[in-house]
Each structure stands twice: as C-alpha cells, then as structure tokens.
Image (tube, rainbow, N blue to C red):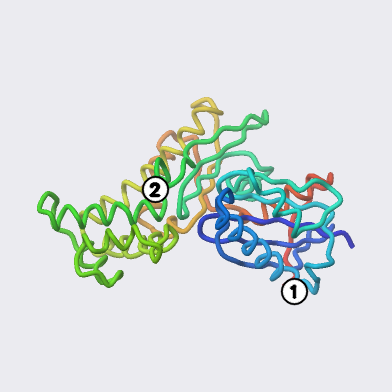
Amino acid sequence: MKLFLGVDGGQSGTTAVIGEETGRILGTGEAGPCNHAAASEGRAKLDRAIRGSVGDACRQAGLDLATVTFEAACFGLSGGPEDRLEILESIVRSPRPLIITTDAVVALAGATTGGQGIIVIGGTGSISYGRNAGGRTARAGGWGYIYGDEGGAFDIGRQALRAALRMEEGWGPPTRLREILIEATGASNANDALHRFYGPEWPRSRVATLAPLVDQAAREGDAVASQVIHNAGQELALLGASVRGQLWRPDEPVEVAYIGGVFRSELLLERFRTLLELDGQTRCGPPLHGPAEGALLDAYRAAGLLLSITYIM
C-alpha cells in the first residue's frame, strides 16, 4: 500500500493528513504552530510541529514515523518554503523530493473544484491566493504581522487594544473593549495590557484568541467593536478582490472560498460576502476541504494521481 502525506502549517497550528493510494484518509494529527524557521527557536518549533502532527497521524493510521516511507509528501507552510528542507527531510522519508510550498497554495488546492478560483485566509494572519483556468496565479497580502495581516485574528486583537488605549487616554470614543481586554489579560489598565502584549507571555497566537471577545462585544451592540469587525471583513474582501482583478475580467464568474477562524464571526462573514458579491459574478462559500487535505491532494498530483479523498475514521 502506497502512502501519501499532506501537512498544513500556520501561525495557529499544524495539521497532518495521511492517505493511501485510493484517496482514503487513514490518519490525521495536530500540533502547534510552525511559522518561520530562520532563527534557532523557529527551527525547533518547526521540528516539534512536524514531528507532533505527523507522528499523531501515523499513530492513528497504525504506522511508525521512524520507519514509514511516503510515496509523496507536500507541506504548505506559513512564511514560505525557505530554510525548511533540511528539517523536513530529517523527519519524513520519501523517494520523491518533498514538496514545500505556502499555506495559501495548499488551502486553494483543497478549497475549490480543480484548485481553481480564489482562497481568502483569515486566521491569525491573512492572505489571498488565486489560480485561473489558464494556470496563472496571483496573491495579495500575507506580509506578516508588522506590515500586513489585515483582517486576521491578531489584527482584530491589535485594533481592539488600540481602541481601548484611545479611550483610556481620552482621544477615542467609549467602548466596552477596554473592560473586556483588562479582564481577559488580568491587566490593571489598557496601558498595562499593551506592555503585556509586548512580552513573551502574549505571543501573536495568544493575542489572536481575543478576536471572539471583540466579535461578542460587536454582537452585543458596542459600536467600536462593530467597526473593528466590519473593517476586518472589508480588509479580507479587498484581498480577495485584488486577486480577482489580477486574474479575471470583471464579467467572468469566479469562485471564492474562505477559511480561518475569523470567518466564524457572522458579522465579519456577512460584510466580507456582501462586498465581494456586489459584482454579481463572484460567489463566496466555505472550502470543499481543509488546507491539509489540499496538501494531500497536491501530493497525489505529484505522483500522477487525480483522486477524491474519503475518510474511513
């Protein structure tokens, strides 16, 4: 039985999926984030995430990570493919070169029919990626937390804190976000929360967990929180619209799939879909499969197999 591996590694976590040659998924595994491997700490994080997720998937499938060989393996990793090969080759064995690409590429591979259309990712960070019928690709966003990631969960938490700070310093409107963030962080005030966010106990992935609290405040009628959520939906729609404009004419129909935790917000999702579907040619919907399954499908394609995947668990 030939085995195939797909891995999706991002800022929030890493998922591995093992399938056999007919498209049946035998095991899945989860581990921590694995973005950016340039620094020694990042390399150790990547090693733990891959060993943990692939090891869990192997155990579920009745396999041993130390001895199993995959016919093909594809890794879609946040931050790009640089500086990853040596670590991955020390963990995963395959007679074929390992496929190392981005999380956006594998997300699109699993999201739409034939891997064509647009994927908009709104997780801890954000990015949009598309491929048209002619095979041309384009992206928008994905610049990282300093210069980009607009609309992602970390950005929502960041914008909430900025609103709380403005209120506290008297140059912003009143909002429950100040009270909510102080309670969530155990801080004495918004400025104290700011300094905690700069510390090691509040990495980006933890700040991102505050996004649902902002959404809850918006649903309860807080005007500032509502603006933060609506702005996030608009930013994500702009990413998708940018990719659309790069690859399709305005009168061409396009399928857009959305994925990531921020789209659990009904307010954000409604804003996102409304803006993208204004042209009457764009249709938004959830993905057919997740990014890890998309990576698995790309691993199949590398071996010349065009399959549909099914679960036996």
Q: How many marks?
A: 2
The type of residue carrying mark 1 is Arg
Left or right: where 163 falls relative to 1: left
Q: Quadrant of the C terminus?
A: bottom right
* x then y, percent, for residue 72: 80, 52
The Cα–Cα distance between marks 2 and 1, rounded to whole angstroms, is 36 Å
Task: Mark 2 vs mark 1: give the one in front.
Answer: 1
Q: Decide if residue 96 is in sight here.
A: yes
* x then y, percent, for residue 217: 26, 63
The label shown at residue 59 is 1
The label shown at residue 151 is 2
Q: Decide if residue 221 is in sight here.
A: no
- For the point 38% across and 40% down, the residue is 275
* Viewer-nearest residue: 14 or 51: 51
What secondary structure is found at the residue carrying circle 1?
helix
Left or right: where 185 falls relative to 129: left
